[in-house]
Image (spheres, rainbow, N blue to C red):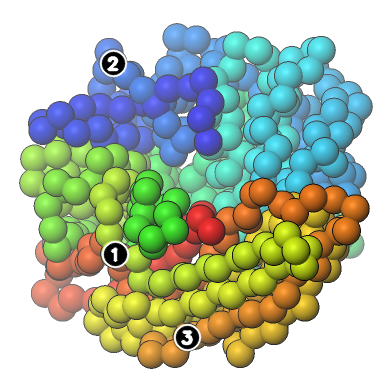
Amino acid sequence: MLLNGRNPTVKGSHGRSIHRKHCAKDANPIGSFGYRRGERVKKLGTQNLHHFLIRIRSDVSLAMINSLFILNGNGEVIIEKHYRGNTKRVECELLWAEVLKAKTPQDVTPVLSTTSGVLIHVYKNNLFFVASVRRDVMPLVVVEFLMRVADIFVDYFGELNEHAIKDNFITVYELLDEMLDNGLPLNMEPSVLKELVKPPDPIAKMIETVTGDSRSNTELPQSSLTNVPWRRRGIRYMQHEIFVDIVEEIDALVSKSGRPVQMQVTGSIFCNAKLSGMPDIRMVLNRSRGDIVDTALHPCVRLKRYEEEGVLSFVPPDSAFKLASYVLRKEYPLPIAVRPKIKYDELSHAGELNITVTPQYSRGPGADGSIEDCVVTLQFTEEVSTTSLSSNIGSTHFDPSRKVCKWTVGQVPMGRTATMTGGLALDPTMPVPKRKPSVLLQFKILSNSISGIMIESCTVLGESKQPYRGLRCITKARKLEYAT
């Protein structure tokens, strides 16, 4: 997604771009955000909401949100919150009109200009998170804020859908009160929010309904008085554990020969540390930062040590969180081979289709190379009327109104090939299509990292007995397109 925004980035000692959210100890903290005074902001990225809050002190118009709406998959407003003025619901109808025009909700531009301002939205799990803002607002900051709102709802409710929001109306509005102050992002740390707004509990909700008591905490969170606002004091666990997930997503355009024309790998390191007290963790990757062209770090990571030593040193939040994300713009061997063949015959006014999907290699400890949750999608042109398709693995479905063929493959073990074949019936009143559809592929591979990035060591400083450490690698296809 390309918008007219900039990313708050600090150049490292090697000239590499590093997104700073904020850092502990090394950063000479100001309040609870931890940034040096007078620090120059060069760029603004989609994952740097904390860093942007510092800029608000000099220009409060940059992230002013007038109103926030949540729409369901039918365009109905289920949550409406106003911070500055009162944006009418009719503004959301303009967004919904664009949704109806688009083939998929993901195709709708995230920034829509209206007569009174701008609507910026994020689509997740059949829900639209919409913010009404002024025209001089930086859109990437609002996009990041809306994504963080969705992530916090998942953290609170365990899922993100219309039913979860309707079942927790009171909690949703209390969270929106704490996250924004007069339209400005204020508090986006789940651990701090959970001290202010208690997560939903069925028994507590029943008592609240009967007594009318609020679930909001009237006391100031302990973490707000320290330079580690993401972790409260007095945390205790019977068993100490650290779980780390490395998730890499592939964006690639593959030519007919099977070679990537363009390729980008986006990686995320998720961490869940169940540790007592204020643990200090030192994590080292198995390779240098040479292949990494862009990095975004959680506020808990000490930037100076990462710049100088390439070490992730941090005091973790007391919940699952994204420790870091990175971008690799290097061509890696694809873990799956797709060979699509589509032919149209002008004489018979028909077509033939043959697509094979084969796992190619296994990379990572315990990896067997099999692919899971594999889905193949083809968007045909209007000349194709019907299809007669079959497959040896999974099921096929063709939507004649949308001209979309969906092959739900599922799991394909290493050493086996999934095949879909069949015929294409063309509309006799229309000419033979000149353009062939590309193949969109989605899949997931467990215990596999396409770049080979792993955690080399993970230690808790000052502890004689190290906790249990679990590591899992996952490779996914985010947008993988094959030319035919």
When asked about the image quadrant of residue 65, the answer is: top right
369 sits to left or right of 108: left
Res 40 label: 2
Specify the amino acid type for callout 2: Arg
- Residue sitting at x 69%, y 78%: 422
Give the mark toward the camera: 3 or 2: 3
Q: Earlier in the sequence, mark 1 or mark 2?
A: 2
- Residue sitting at x 64%, y 85%: 391
Binning the other alpha carbons within 10 Å of mark 1 as few (below 14), some (14 to 19) or many (20 upward) gives few
Q: Position of residue 268 (x, y in %)?
A: 37, 55
The reply to whether residue 319 is visible in this rendering is no
Tag 1 secondary structure: loop
Specify the amino acid type for callout 3: Thr
Res 333 label: 1
Circle 3/circle 2 CB separation < 8 Å = no
Q: Position of residue 477 (x, y in %)?
A: 47, 62
- Residue sitting at x 29%, y 86%: 366
Give the mark toward the camera: 1 or 2: 1
Q: Earlier in the sequence, mark 3 or mark 1?
A: 1
Residue located beneath label 3 in the image: 417
297 sits to left or right of 170: left
Tag 3 secondary structure: loop
Q: CA distance from mark 3 to mark 1?
A: 18 Å
Specify the amino acid type for callout 1: Pro
Q: Position of residue 324 (x, y in %)?
A: 33, 50
Circle 1/circle 2 CB separation < 8 Å = no
Front one among 92 and 222 = 92
Q: CA distance from mark 1 to mark 2?
A: 39 Å
